[in-house]
Amino acid sequence: MKRKNLRRKGIAWSAAVILLAGSLTACGSSSGSDDGSAADAADGDVITITNVSYDPTREFYAAYNELFTAYYEEETGQAVEVVQSHGGSGSQARSVIEGSDADVVTLALAHDITLIEEEGLIEEGWIDEFEGNSSPYTSTIVFLVRAGNEKGIEDWDDLTAEGVDVITPDPKSSGGACWNFLAAWYYADLQYGGDEDQMRSFVSALYDNVLVMDSGARGATTTFVENGQGDVLIAWENEALLAMEEYPGEFEIVTPSISILAEPSVAIVDENVDDNGTREVAQSYLEYLYSDEAQTLAGENYYRPSNEEILETFSDTFDLSVNLCTIDDFGGWDQAYEDFFQDGGIFDEIYNAE
């Protein structure tokens, strides 16, 4: 059955990122020494670093950047400015590969950073540089429905019912969409005892119901929340909670019986920081994400802190009992991407099927 939706490619956003990448090249290298240390920056200079991130982190990093720059100046006497770029995680990774002068990347999944590593911009072993697979916070996948839940959506199989319009972003450009797909696939695996034909049929039926596939998670949220399209949004938990806060009484969150531990990863873009003289600041920027202050801030912005003690203080915010599969259940991200999301993979076979 031909899909009824058209992908939204985010053309305006892509153009903005290209312009941003071009204009930031000088900013990232304007201060700091050639050896990668900020120590030789002249008194009064401001060191600028660029964080290329994914869609739903806008609010968190707006707050974190203020927290970090105040901390760093107090600790070192050095003023820092952090420039942000946001978009679909896969698209953001490609922008770095194509020349966006990122000092750090904070993307939706490890594979997107691996793509940058494979281009020689990030050193091998980056995933072990910081704790928890270099994921200072996590999230999971939930359903956001309109108040009253008119279609009675409770679990993944309800998304395949006739007359249910689903909103989810495109796995070809959105890391969040990849997590969405894998969570649905794992549910189908359990439902059908590993029978791949039935699993494919189930996920195909779900994507038959997809009304719009935006290029990123935030675009999908906008389509559902602001534009009023669809009956259910498959969303990052943090996005769903933010929508509930911003539009009180208009939406409900449904936690499916099975979801996935989503680990957004962070990394230093080694080639760029060495060129820009910003390694010391970039290292501190990512390390400070694990501080108690930043972990609390992550929780306040609806991300699950990696610090278990701080996570427990947000037990009223998050359903900590949800049954979560992990990327290890798919053989790790390299294997999962090859199986599901590379050109001609399972997603393409399902989505492009007649």
Image (tube, rainbow, N blue to C red):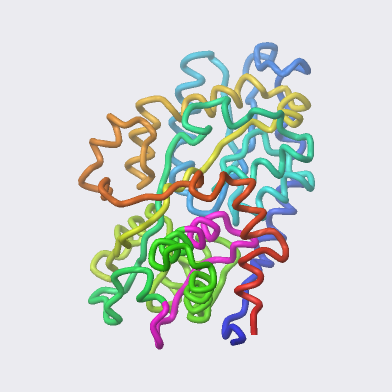
Q: Is residue 230 left or right of residue 40?
A: left
User: Residue shown at 60%/23% (left/top)?
Assistant: 281
Residue 284 vs 254, above or below: the answer is: above
Residue farthest to the left, as pictured: 316
**Residue 167 in the figure: left or right of residue 146:** right
Asked if the magenta segment contains residue 181, the reply would be yes
116 vs 177, left or right, is: right
Say which residue appears at 57% left-offset and 69% top-offset. Answer: 214
Quarter of the image with the N terminus is bottom right
100 or 327, which lies in front? 327
Tally of numbered discs: 0
Split into 4 quadrants, where in the image is the C terminus? bottom right
Q: Which residues are magenta?
A: 160-182
Query: At x 64% / y 37%, what residue is drawn?
Result: 50
Q: Is residue 309 shown in magenta? A: no
Spot occupied by residue 246 in the image (x, y as percentages of width and height): 33, 60
Give the left or right position of residue 97, taking residue 249 as reference. right
Horizontal and vertical percent for residue 237? 37, 54
Q: Position of residue 285 (x, y in %)?
A: 54, 27
Q: Nearer the viewer, residue 118 or 247?
A: 118
Residue 276 location (% of width, % of height): 74, 27
Residue 66 position (above or below residue 197): above
Depth order, front residue of 171/81: 171
**Point 67% across, 33% down: residue:** 103
